[in-house]
Image (cartoon, rainbow, N blue to C red):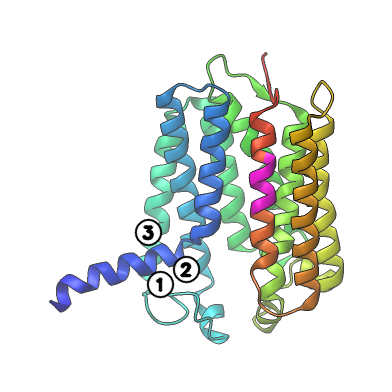
Amino acid sequence: MADSALPRHRIRNLARACHPGPTVAVTAFSVALAAGANAPVTTTFLLGAAVLTGQLSIGWSNDWIDADRDRAVNRADKPVGAGALPASVVRNAAFLGLGASVVFSMMLGWRAGLAHLFVVAMGWAYNLGLKSTAWSWLPYGLAFGTLPLAIALALPGHPVAAWWAMLGGALLGVGAHGANVIPDLQEDRATGVRGLPHRIGRTATSIGSAVALMTVTVLAVLIPPGSPTVGAVAALLAAACLTVGGMVSALRGGRSRLPFTAALAVAGINVVLLVLSDWVVPR
């Protein structure tokens, strides 16, 4: 009985260690963008598999690399740090996920494949050391800014993403980085992590993240050709409420994940706006 329960226990902890919220969100958003651009079913499936395995590898590598830091601050929400999962298991899973992502990415064609693998490489670069530097925002910005391009290049004819879609993705990444780090500022400082949010402080990070997130929605509403629809304006107002709510929560301190949850919700709104707009540019 114990032997059969162990694998299930490890599977549950592996699921917790992959950072399931961002992993599922980024995968779902990518699939939605591809489907909204009328990608063939096979392309949409391969894209989803490439993004999912890539995000799994990033999430697992984060918990593997940060295992000692998580143990030092008693992170109960991290299975490796809490002693519920060996670091070697998460390390092996991270490399398996990375290998699978390479295969699925290249099946999309070399253009889209290389673009998506750049996205994955940025996530690994953040985990491997950039998170502790003043450039901690850069991998997020480059990764999220490149993701729309990778999706577009996977479509028939290999079109490109509109400049404002890539800029919006980059700003979304920067805003999400700040929102994600804010709850962990104290623990990160205690273990030597000194990314940009740690250097400029909670208040500046909260305000800067809010400005970045709102700019994304403004771009998605105002830049596409034609007058904004009533639905687009409503989406802008909803994004503004979510952004302000997340900023207020961040400024209050504590370890609430509300700022990052709000950032994911704003990302979802922007994905809907992108799907309804002409974000793919034929070459």
Residue 75, image x and y in percent? 53, 81
User: Which SS type dominates the magenta stretch?
Assistant: helix
Give the amino acid type for the residue marked by disc 3 in the picture. Ala
Q: Which residues are magenta?
A: 265-270
Give the amino acid type for the residue marked by disc 1 in the picture. Ala
Q: Residues within 10 Å of mark 1 (few under 14, many from 20)?
A: many
Q: What residue is shown at x 12% (from left), y 76% (from top)?
A: 1
Q: Secondary structure at mark 1?
A: helix
Residue 66 - label: none
Reading the image, the residue beneath label 2 is: 64
Instruction: Tell me the quadrant of the picture where the C terminus can be found.
Output: top right
Judge by depth and name the residue closer to the eye, 125 or 1.
1
Callouts 3 and 2 close, C-beta under 8 Å: no
Residue 94, image x and y in percent? 42, 57
Q: Spatial distance from mark 3 to mark 2, Cα to Cα? A: 10 Å
Q: Secondary structure at mark 3?
A: helix
Callouts 1 and 2 close, C-beta under 8 Å: yes
Residue 27, image x and y in percent? 51, 44
- In the picture as drawn, the residue positioned furthest to the front comes out as 230
Q: Residues within 10 Å of mark 3 (few under 14, many from 20)?
A: some
**Horizontal side, residue 271 vs residue 110: left or right:** right
Q: Is residue 275 above or below residue 27?
A: above
Reading the image, the residue beneath label 3 is: 93
Asked if residue 189 is among those painted magenta in the image, a careful observer would answer: no
Q: Residues within 10 Å of mark 2 (few under 14, many from 20)?
A: many
Residue 191 seen in the current view? yes
Give the amino acid type for the residue marked by disc 2 in the picture. Trp
Sequence-first tag of 3 and 2: 2
Reading the image, the residue beneath label 1 is: 87
Residue 143 seen in the current view? no
Q: What residue is shown at x 20% (from left), y 73% (from top)?
A: 5
Judge by depth and name the residue closer to the eye, 112 or 212.
212
